[in-house]
Image (cartoon, rainbow, N blue to C red):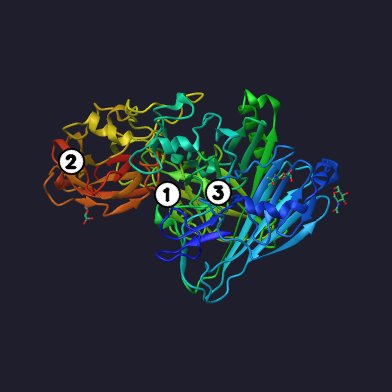
Amino acid sequence: MPMVVGRGRRWSDLIIWWVGVVLQLLFLLSNAQNLQGREGLSEDKIQADLPSAGVQLLEQDKQIVMCNGIVSITLTVPGGAVTNITYKDSGNLLETKDTKEYNRGLEGTSYKIIVQNENQTEISFTRTWKVGSSDAPLNVDKRFVMLRNSPGFYSYAVLERLKGWPAFNIEEGRIVFKLQENKFHYMAMSDDRQRFMPMPKDRLTGETLDYKEAVLLTNPTNPEFKGEVDDKYLYSCDNKDNQVHGWVSSDPPVGFWIITPSNEFRTGGPIKQDLTSHVGPYVLAMFISRHYAGDDIDLKFQTEEYWKKVFGPVFIYLNFDATAKSHPSVLWNDAKQRMQKEVASWPYRFPFSKDYVKSNQRGAVSGQLLVDDWFINKQPVPGASAFVGLAPLGVAGSWQLESKGYQFWTKTDQNGKFLIQDVIPGTYSLFAWIPGTLGDYKYAYDITISQGTVVEARNMIFKAPREGETLWEIGIPDRSAAEFFIPNPSPKFKIHKYRVEVEKFRQYGLWTRYEDLYPQEDLIFKVGISNYKKDWFFAHVTRKATNDEYVPTTWKILFDLKNINKGANYTLQLALASANRAELQVRFNDPKTLPHFTTGPIGKDNTLARHGIHGVYHFYSIGIAGSWLATGMNTIFLTQASSRGLFREVMYDYIRFEGPI
Ligand SMILES: *[C@@H]1O[C@H](CO)[C@@H](O)[C@H](O)[C@H]1NC(C)=O
Ligand SMILES: *[C@@H]1O[C@H](CO)[C@@H](O)[C@H](O)[C@H]1NC(C)=O
Ligand SMILES: *[C@@H]1O[C@H](CO)[C@@H](O)[C@H](O)[C@H]1NC(C)=O
């Protein structure tokens, strides 16, 4: 069922809308024919399955049903596509109509019941690649697990490629369910981001905006949504916050949730962002994607490369509450509690695959992170609330584009101390960054984790980037542009009123507001007078010229320097929170000269179009010869020079001008 589409050639007969190589773990009801196999299925048998009866398995010709008296799921054999998920007597919660346009990804070619007893069922659907086959060069082992008295089921997959198999890339990997569209209308992904959603047909009657995912609702089923924009990227969030999301059905009042109890198998680290749930109603477990990162994060395999990785398990959790008819968020609150329980039981004990590493086979690392920035403190001080993580070997910051291995992250306490538990044995780099401190940290030594041991990382001192004293700074070094000016959306669009107003940057079309605010002249920031919260636009965008062409924009930072030391060097510390097909050029006091510094072409994170406030982090320490500066007023010209298109941008994280060295 993983589905792979090649660069120019496809490895399957299934088409989806991404270009490049796509791998999907896709579970969808396909069409009514798949249900025919259930004719011999005894309804009585299922009805009789009270919780105490334990887990039952009914094998038939073309399908297999797992049930535990609470939940029942039907899988095709040997493909392993899920065709029916039922909570008690809810009826099938998966969409059954018009599913031709969807596909299930590559399916298994054989299956095996790994275990079946009153307490647990686990089924494995496999597909083995044969040399010369036109399928994706991967071995697939897709698993489904049901436990006694458990209101849901687990799914995970083991993917493997052998040395010598054809080179190929994986761009995307996920599990997706399409729920009954006439039942599931309320979506929840956080305490604040939950709402009744538009219907799929509202997208068809609406007006497509700057890209096909964004649709203006002109004639929605619920007239309250008229004027809103629907776009699946409005419901993205950071991996670290993406632990539970899903939908609530109005009748019966049943919730359908995906719980992802660990980030270890996701790509790109804790602040990589991805999709959650969106109009369809779709609910996704994203494992691999380019979203907010670009194709640099694709898994690129060379012929000689061996690779194996376990994705999941994730838990498909179902719940019910009669009061959810009028208060759907009660089911969200319950799902959140269940998520905490699942997180607490990670690593799970139940998976039977030997590739899933159990808790007692794992190891740990502990340490204390100190940060050394002489301008702020004479002595190194604890790096409090820092993100610390193990990821495959690489240079500082490489974790954000890392996709093949596992990553294990935590946050330090007030003393900079941390313990990362349940790490899969292997050799890793130890990385960190501290919100409020510029730059990326990498520990000097590789960390080898082995079963049952705790490695102590000693002498973890992050020497923060610093050349001279701070003369001025703009923003907060936290890898995000959220502190800058974020405009209201164009009055053309209606803003959905969430429970509270959250994350102002998650609105369609904010990019057009730059030209409304700066119709003639580009942004000018005067150090000491301007306020970055009001006077620094959150994204450095292009400007629309005639004929659908876009032109570069140049922002100016004006600042006063007394007693310039022409013989010394100064430093501009420049951190970007996002870059999309951009080139940022920096000039000092002469807008016409060749750039004193250029980033060169950078970034494909597409953060602006996807309503994000951070994508891939870039950091530059730019040396400035004192001779480029003047006593008195100086100007730094920042030109976003790559302008062929609408969504070419950089978002600044932080800028600091440092005094003579
Ligand atoms: C789905 O499964 C449930 C429980 O096994 C069964 O009662 C129901 O008839 C099934 N629905 C369809 C459409 O097959
Ligand atoms: C199922 O779990 C119960 C309670 O832990 C245990 O007594 C029983 O032996 C288990 N059954 C099987 C088949 O493992
Ligand atoms: C300034 O930087 C240049 C180029 O890196 C270097 O050659 C020079 O020695 C530096 N001057 C001082 C005073 O540090």
Mark 3: amino acid: Thr
What is the number of the mark on residue 273? none
Which numbered mark, 1 or 2, is in the foreground of this view? 2
- Dot 1 or dot 2, earlier in sequence: 1
Residue matched to label 1: 440
Residue 274 on image: x %, y %: 48, 45
Question: Along the horizontal axis of the image, is 319 left or right of 567?
Answer: right
Q: Secondary structure at mark 2?
A: loop
Which numbered mark, 3 or 2, is in the foreground of this view? 3
How dense is the environment of label 2, judged by Cα within 10 Å: few (below 14), some, or many (20 and up)? few
Which numbered mark, 3 or 1, is in the foreground of this view? 3
How dense is the environment of label 3, judged by Cα within 10 Å: few (below 14), some, or many (20 and up)? some
Q: Does the beta carbon of the residue at mark 1 sit less than 8 Å from ligand 3?
A: no
Q: Give the quarter the ligand 1 occupies.
A: top right
Residue 249 on image: x %, y %: 62, 33
Residue matched to label 3: 99
Pick the residue in front: 454 or 216: 216
Residue matched to label 2: 545
- Dot 3 or dot 2, earlier in sequence: 3
- Dot 3 or dot 1, earlier in sequence: 3
Mark 1: amino acid: Asp
Mark 2: amino acid: Ala
Q: Does the beta carbon of the residue at mark 2 sit less than 8 Å from ligand 3?
A: no
In the rendered image, which quarter is residue 245 located in?
A: top right
Q: Secondary structure at mark 1?
A: loop
Residue drawn at the location 30% of the way across and 40% of the way down:
656
CB contact under 8 Å: marks 3 and 1:
no
Residue 425 on image: x %, y %: 62, 60
